Image: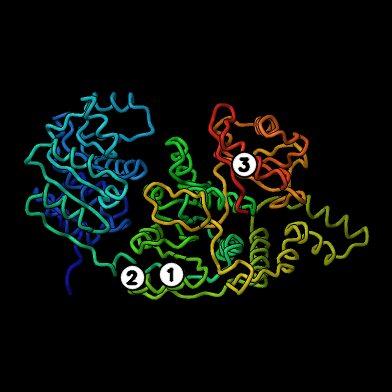
Amino acid sequence: MEKELLFSDLGISEEILKAVEEMGYTQPSTIQQQSIPFLLEGKDVIGQAQTGTGKTASFGIPIIDQVDPSLNKPQALILCPTRELAVQVEGEIVKLSKYKRGISSTCIYGGEAIDRQIRSLKKGVQIVVGTPGRIMDHMQRRTLNLDHVSIIVLDEADEMLDMGFRDDIETILSSMPEDRQTVFFSATMPKPIMDLTKKFQTNPEIVRVLRKELTVENISQEYYEVKPSMKIELMHRLINLHQINLAVVFCNTKRSTDEVTESLISRGIQAEALHGDLSQAQRTKVMNKFRKGHCKVLVATDVAARGIDVDNVEVVFNYDLPLDEENYVHRIGRTGRAGKSGKAISFITGRKDMFRVKDLEKFIKTSITKMAPPSASDLVELKKEQFTKDIYRQLSAEGDTQIYEETIGQLLTEGLTLEQITLALMKMQLGNSLEAISEQSFELELGRGGDRGGRDSGARRGERNDRGDRGGRFERGGRDGGRERGKFGSSSREKGKREPNMARLFLNLGKKDRIRPNDIVGAIAGETGVPGRSIGGIDIFDNFSFVDVPSKDAAHVIDVMNTNTIKGKAVNIELSKG
């Protein structure tokens, strides 16, 4: 029987071995086994591997072992397509170099004050991780000198090309010493990538992780047929049924991430949106909340999700099917990490999506199991089971129960029975939720009629894809932060309800733009002539708002307001998809 390869067999330093062991790893992944020896020998490498296969350590370990700690100048450059991924990679470098004295790294990307980055570079660092645009910016300012760089790594090179960074990449590579080591890591190897490798690499070693390993066996893959209007309800049921504590939901558009998040929050689920419109500070805040478990569900676009590096994600939801098979593999690779089991759940709407599922099965060489949506009775049984467990947990817990015993005794003397007291307490604890669930009669499976051919409502005009996203269809759902309700007209609304003959409008401005309810009412009333008292409920979120206006005035409000501003900011207003 062949001996399993360990990190200690790869010829890396004791300091890195100690750091790797501290991080909980003993056996290198396939991509690490194949690429680390070549990189330690100084060879150029082309590595084809997906997210979640351990490729950061594949190039991070050789880089740390080869840089000179006594030379406080950039010796290694790592390019990443997004700031999230750059932050993730630099964080991994910091962990791996923990016991290597004198080695420092920095991360530079757009959306952050450049002065801080300049100070960091002036202090002296050996390893620089960054996005192509900001790297170019520092090169032009002469704050980043590449003369001593001996190795450059292009991580997720295909994504960088998809995002339009080819010219920047060629400029950066052409500005470096000719005897440098050049490394490409990419999920796919399209012709543009191979053209770059021919131009900038010398006799590269090619390392590939086979697709069967990319769709790791410990991820169960399922799909549900569901009407577009019932996707949120189905996801809510599944989260409750499986008692999910950490999940990632993938959407194809920025707008959809916000809408899905709002819908989850309205159902009592802690959720946050992650997409390209967020500032770096907002992104960092969202990711920190997710990593610490303060946020149960992260709703993201494909590009924004490049920076998600959390080992204990239990479920990935494809709320909207990706139009690219490789993206599907990227998505489901967010769960089932670090040897844990994971689950990938896709929502299917109509025949077109069914054909996509067949294509995905051919691509991944694995079947995706069709599942029946959980019924209301399933949820009732779950609630009862959870409540029973809570009772036993409380009975076994330590603590003074005298005050409770006295209260029960008093109720018994007043003529109540133990059964009556228990029933009342159960009803108080469960908040009538069992009755509410029992009365639900949603038909979650895809049926005929209703949602017209099963098209998602998000496929209408006006939706914008996140930069680099390849999808376009979607439905409704979410928010990005706290909500503020206006008190105009019909005042605050119940969830999803509004006054008759009112139309709900989506507005692209929110709390981050310092927008208040009176700003919206004043602008609409002043510019359109619609009386302020006629304007209904207003919900203001971090990045957008909703406002109810009389249905007969909706088209006029949209037409006029789209050529105006609120508090000096351009307005984009349209009918809400909900």
| Image coords of residue 471 (percent x, y) | 42, 57
- Check the image and name the residue furthest to the right: 414
Could you say which disc has been placed on residue 558 in the image? Answer: 3
Give me the disc on residue 364. 2
204 left or right, relative to 136: left
SS assignment at label 1: strand
Looking at this view, is 116 or 186 the one in front? Answer: 186
Q: Earlier in the sequence, mark 1 or mark 2?
A: 1
Helix or strand or loop: what does disc 3 sit on?
helix
Q: In which quarter of the image is the C terminus?
A: bottom right
Whichever of callouts 2 and 3 sits on the residue coming sooner in the sequence is 2
- The answer to whether marks 1 and 2 mark residues whose Cβ atoms lie closer than 8 Å is yes
Mark 3: amino acid: Ile
Q: In this view, does 565 lie to the left or right of 424?
A: left
Task: Tell me the residue that label 1 is attached to.
Answer: 221
Q: Mark 2 against mark 3, which lies toward the viewer?
A: 3
Residue 448, horizontal then vertical, whole percent:
61, 74
Q: Is residue 89 left or right of residue 328?
A: left
Three-letter code for the amino acid on which mark 2 is drawn: Ile
Name the one closer to the observer, 90 or 526: 526
Which residue is at 14% across, 30% downward? 70
Q: Which quadrant would residue 567 be assigned to in this image?
A: top right
Q: Is mark 2 on a helix, strand or loop?
A: helix
Q: Residue 379's spot in the image, x, y percent? A: 64, 68
Mark positioned earlier in the residue sequence (3 or 1): 1
Contact between labelled residues 1 and 3, with CB atoms less than 8 Å apart: no
Cα distance, mark 2 to mark 3?
45 Å
Q: Is residue 315 visible?
A: no
Question: Can you tell which mark lies on residue 94?
Answer: none
